[in-house]
Amino acid sequence: MSTVGVVRFPGTNCEFDTVEAIERLGGRGRIIWHEDTHLDGIDAVVIAGGFAHGDYLRPGAIARFSPIMSAVISAAGEGMPVVGICNGFQVLTEAGLLPGALQKNRGLTFINDWQNLRVSSTNSVFTSAAEVDRKLRIPINHFEGNFTCDDSTLDDLVANDQIVLTYVDNPNGSVGDIAGICNRERNVVGLMPHPERASDAMLGSNDGNILMESLLASI
Amino acid sequence: MDEPLHRALGLTDDEAESIAEILGREPNPLELSMYSVMWSEHCSYKSSRIHLKRLPTEAPWVLVGPGENAGVVDVGDGIAAAFRIESHNHPSAIEPYQGAATGVGGILRDIFTMGARPIALMDPLRFGPLDDPRSRWIAEGVVSGISGYGNSVGVPTVGGETVFDETYMGNPLVNVFCLGIMPAERLVLGEATGVGNVAILFGSSTGRDGIGGVSVLASAGFDEDEDDSSKRPSVQVGDPFEEKRLIEACLELLDEGLVVGIQDLGGAGLCCATSETASRGGMGMDVDVTAVHLRQPDLEPFEVMTSESQERMLAIVEPNNVDRVLELCAKWEVTASAVGTVVEGGQLRILDGPDGDVLADIPASSLHDAAPLYDRPMAEPDRSSEVDPSTLEAPDDPWADLCGFLMDTSWVHRQYDSQLFLNTVVGPGADASLLRLKHPVTGEDTGRGLGLTTDGNHHWCIVNPYRGTAMTVAEAVLNLACVGAKPLALVNNLNFGNPEHPETMWQLSQAVDGMAEACSAMSVPVVGGNVSLYNESNGNNIDPTPIVGMLGMTGSLDQPPPGKGLVDGHRLIVLGPDGSGLGGSLWGRSKGAVGGDLPELDYELHLRVAEVTRALVSGGLVSAVHDVGAGGLGLAVAEMAIAGGVGAIAARVADHDALFSEAPSRVVVCVAPDTMSTVEQMAESMGVPITRLGLATGDRISFKGLLDGALDEAQAIFSSRIPDALGVH
């Protein structure tokens, strides 16, 4: 069975939730400590949500220097699926695996709330099992989730179909209502919403499972 | 003449004399400072202990009752639940962000000290009125402090309450409730045993923050003449990232069985943790004050011993495990130092270096057991001049009165991570919160749920603290029933005014008796608590505000409970007796009438209402459910209409008294037409009276002959009240 490695930095807090959501779908999740230097036996990587290294300096700014990130960057270069959820998205932008940056929410408060998302592209390792325009009900949970980039980067994202998820009602001021993007090679995806929190109808929605299923199918 | 040192430290002359008696000599300044923090009101409960003894604390499922860091109950499948409530009222009045943040940090440590992983926080908050700028500043600071700390430390905040009222002007209440779960066999207590075992201090370095927090700050009121900002250095500063690593490090230490006992450092810092672990274990301890890792080099021994720097723990470890403990701490980037040794006898000795001078030498247990116990004078306040709201004329515009009570608190709880750990079936804003219960180690879903609620109502308790507190406990029972949960136990936070005022002590004593009566009658043991006194501002005591945090459990959890929202075309029924009487009501308060007395509370009937509510909720027989509390039946129906986006047409409500009465033991349910007879039969078979109230439909909220208003108007008032007041949109 293929294995999804879920990275744990000091301060990460969604790692076990992410493993639970993966295993609920029949996948296998394994926690990877940030000081590890290899990804032996790992077929895909999720950088889970939380506050890696306390979000000190800036979310993701210290995490990109953790030893495991060199392995993640080179694996991503070789085509391994890599997904960053929330804080993981911030880490991926800091590490240069994805363009843009996440700044403070427009309203200058932390927001934990359900959002309606729209699938904008199915051409990525995290959206391949969905359909374009499908609505997904998945919560956000962040202070710094306001995606921003310069105009030419935004043009590139649009031109290359790299915007994979958008908000129906933009909660945080993200440019282009962007909730998630992928790299040009489509194997690295970052998103602010938490699909693992929408993994069971008992918790309010299981719309996140289609994203996790996409990841498992991509391995 | 200079003030004697003991008085400057907050000790009375009599207390100083007892210390000299205990030691058989005059204490030195270090010893005196240690007694002053440990014998403070905050640490010693010297004014309230005599009353707290009257609370019922036992039940077969109670594993640990009051007196430990947290209460612990057995929740089945080999899982134990630890929970506790604490206050951080005074620090939050001075420095709202850090005051609230460190309140969260402190309660978390109480839970993981017991060996439990904290899985949920709840915050009952009380602020001054929204039209007061300072109260708004406090509210915004407190909420962002809870958000900033709680979210980052990685423990979801799943509920709480937010109330704005003039009684809290200048003295907000910031209570924090925390729940943790653990494998039942991992339960650890804060005991130092085994001569030669090593005391390891780990976590943040020790600095000058929070020195005297318990005595200077928490055990005195606020006064306009004084500049309260001068108390600011007594407020600690929190670091949630340090705490997060501390949680993970502690749980790994416990998983590996490396500690004999463990204790967090809270109020009174190292002085409290060393003396408490030693006296619980019936041992003594030698503490090398120079071994403590410091934030700045020039701390005096008394500062090291009484500093309330946050995010610190003390573990008692066998010598052969010390290296492994240090290694695990290093993995989590947590600084650790061996600072003490468990010794025979009962003396706590503070040493200047491993073989250095003895700086203090006192019986460890005397800091706790010998603390003074006061039976302070009590007097019932004279409230005869207060107006009984039942004597007021009927309002001209009950709709306007009702709209005045509408307030959506989602501005508060949207700032909290309420979903982490994938347990939250019902989160903030509901009658009670509901969490899936998964095994803390295997992650296996037990198929059952834990219900949690915090409740308090100062309007009731100022009118009649005895019955008001009993009604508070009763409301918590009904709130749990609304999510299908049956009560297991409660913890309480008794927020009162100045204990040196006989009226305050009478209120406290009455509240304890009312709680004892309700808990006994409804079989809910009290497994822990906290007392916060000196909640006063400019000589005015707050209204008595006992807050309860109640834990309950559901049977098989097959579907989420229905929530409050009305469903179009369904019928409205009130389960429970007719309610009347306006004493203690929000409506009375809004008219300035705070006299009279509270409605009656019939425990037998109340339990039957709770039972039928649980049965209806867990059986999936109702489409919406909401108990009647503050604001009465009128507000309950309006909130249900707003939540569902569906209007209500109600009848059989005689007058404004019946509309706004907060008489207990009532629940409004929404029922599909074809389920009506089943619901009515169930209620009848359980001996619960019902009233057919009306129908959920349309876009208006109407009570025949009383009021009729547009749902969208109510919705707009509801959702804009807090954002408008704060100027945030």
Image (cartoon, coloured by chain):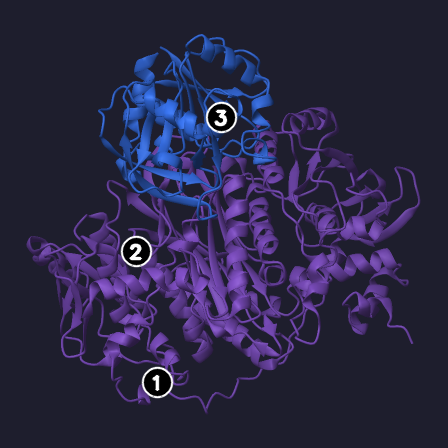
Chain colours: A blue, B purple
Name the quadrant of the C terminus of chain B. Answer: bottom left
Instruction: Count residues near mark 3 (Cα–Cα under 10 Å), then give few for <14, some for 14-19, many for 20+.
Output: many
The residue pinned by badge 1 equals B389
Instruction: Pinpoint residue A2: horizontal percent, then vertical percent.
Output: 37, 11
The residue pinned by badge 3 equals A93
Give the answer, above or below, for where B219 lies relative to B502.
above
Instruction: Pinpoint residue B575: horizontal percent, then vertical percent.
Output: 21, 65
How far apart marks 3 and 1 lie (CA) works out to: 61 Å
Nearer to the camera, B613 or B183? B613
| Front label number (3 vs 1) | 3
Give SS at disc 2: helix
Q: Quadrant of residue B99?
A: bottom right
The residue pinned by badge 2 equals B481
Residue type at mark 3: give it.
Answer: Thr
Do callouts 1 and 2 point to residues on the same chain?
Answer: yes
Task: Identify the subunit bearing mark 2.
Answer: B
Task: Identify the subunit bearing mark 1.
Answer: B
Q: Quadrant of residue B533?
A: bottom right
Nearer to the camera, A158 or B430? A158
Q: Quadrant of residue A154?
A: top left
Residue type at mark 1: give it.
Answer: Pro
Identify the mark nearer the N-term, 1 or 2. Answer: 1
Name the quadrant of the N terminus of chain B. Answer: bottom right
- Furthest-front residue in view? A152
Question: Looking at the image, do the residues carrying marks 1 and 2 touch, with CB atoms under 8 Å apart?
Answer: no
Instruction: Pinpoint residue B619: horizontal percent, then vertical percent.
Output: 19, 48
Residue occupying the point 51% across, 64% down: B136
Q: Is residue B443 left or right of residue B644?
A: right
Residue occupying the point 58% across, 47% down: B105
How far apart marks 1 and 2 lie (CA) works out to: 30 Å
